């Protein structure tokens, strides 16, 4: 059993379904938790006591109270919604440029047939990734990268995917989230690394190499980084209270070294209390 927040919190309470935090570039980056009828400017909550209480599920597709399977979707919707087709995580599987449907060709054309960026980002180590051009620098912020640089800008997701696959043989494609959250990172010369990797790009992507650009530096609103990382999962701990000490990537960082991945809890309806 857990307490009724309406009785236990004398100040502010919000209720809504979690989705990934919205961000605005700045120094530091600005974070917002957006609910259906309200939003919270998370930066303003630093050094405040926060309670997160799990209430129920709400699938981001069907809206039903069904257990979330992945990425905010229930099991059925995860396997039929076009937003979570295999090509999302593996861009090289994109087929809209061939006029071939995966789940919804109209949707896939809208998303896949637009400029995409292959980039290098440094969050725990140098990694290669793909994002739509419109998602720069949002994608880097979500990954907790403190520096990033564009490598190529291509006209569709497929080209970005095959370029990423080629570069993964020479640089990582995963972030160590614990290292990122503890801020155990080393500055790298991403521009130099980018030029070293150019020769490994597939022939189709070579003409799209970006020769003259500079790193983007990102600064996160963190008062104190955790020394040891304890991950909060609402299914295991349906109510948690802690003092917020930082926001990095899509994580809330608390004084007791607890970290809460907001994006991993998309589709969870929560009571969010601020003392």
Image: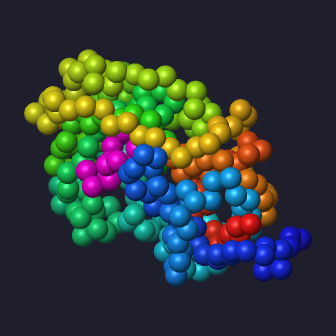
Give the extent of the magenta segment. Answer: 129-140
Q: Nearer the viewer, residue 118 or 226?
A: 226
Q: Farthest residue in the left direction?
A: 207
Image coordinates for residue 186, horizontal then vertical, percent: 49, 22
Q: Is residue 72 visible from the viewing direction of this image?
A: no
Q: Is residue 131 magenta?
A: yes
Left or right of 224: which side holds 217? left
Q: Nearer the viewer, residue 52 or 13?
A: 13
Image coordinates for residue 103, horizontal then vertical, percent: 35, 66
Image coordinates for residue 36, horizontal then vertical, percent: 51, 79
Residue at position x 58%, y 60% in the image: 44
Q: Is residue 54 magenta?
A: no
Left or right of 140: which side holds 58? right
Residue at position x 24%, y 70% in the image: 106
Image coordinates for residue 73, horizontal then vertical, percent: 54, 67
**Placement of 255 over or under 6, stated as above or below:** above
Q: Quadrant of the C terminus?
A: bottom right
**Placement of 221 over or under 36, stated as above or below:** above
Q: Nearer the viewer, residue 36 or 214?
A: 214
The answer to which quarter of the image holds residue 193 is: top left
Q: Quadrant of the N terminus?
A: bottom right
Q: Is residue 142 visible from the viewing direction of this image?
A: yes
Tally of marks: 0
Residue at position x 51%, y 30% in the image: 124
**Placement of 39 over or under 259, stated as above or below:** below
Q: Nearer the viewer, residue 77 or 42?
A: 42
Question: Which color scheme did the rendering employ for the protein?
Answer: rainbow
Residue at position x 57%, y 32% in the image: 183
């Amino acid at each position: 059993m857990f307490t009724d927040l309406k009785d236990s919190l004398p100040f502010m309470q919000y209720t809504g379904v979690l989705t990934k935090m919205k961000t605005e570039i700045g120094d530091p980056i600005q974070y917002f938790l957006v609910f259906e009828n309200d939003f919270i400017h998370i930066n303003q909550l630093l050094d405040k006591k926060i309670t997160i209480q799990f209430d129920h599920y709400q699938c981001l597709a069907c809206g039903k109270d069904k257990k979330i399977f992945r990425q905010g979707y229930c099991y059925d919707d995860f396997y039929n919604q076009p937003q979570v087709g295999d090509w999302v995580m593996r861009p090289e599987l994109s087929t809209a440029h061939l006029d071939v449907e995966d789940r919804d060709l109209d949707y896939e054309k809208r998303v896949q047939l637009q400029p995409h960026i292959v980039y290098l980002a440094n969050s725990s180590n140098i990694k290669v990734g793909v994002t739509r051009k419109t998602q720069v620098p949002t994608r880097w912020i979500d990954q907790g990268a403190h520096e990033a640089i564009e490598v190529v800008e291509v006209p569709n997701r497929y080209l970005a995917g095959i370029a990423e696959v080629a570069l993964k043989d020479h640089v990582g494609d995963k972030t160590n989230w614990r290292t990122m959250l503890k801020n155990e990172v080393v500055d790298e010369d991403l521009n130099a690394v980018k030029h070293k990797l150019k020769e490994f790009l597939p022939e189709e992507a070579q003409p799209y190499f970006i020769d003259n650009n500079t790193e983007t530096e990102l600064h996160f609103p963190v008062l104190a980084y955790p020394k040891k990382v304890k991950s909060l999962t609402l299914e295991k701990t349906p109510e948690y209270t802690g003092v917020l000490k930082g926001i990095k990537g899509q994580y809330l960082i608390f004084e007791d070294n607890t970290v809460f991945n907001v994006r991993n809890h998309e589709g969870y309806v929560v009571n969010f209390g601020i003392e």
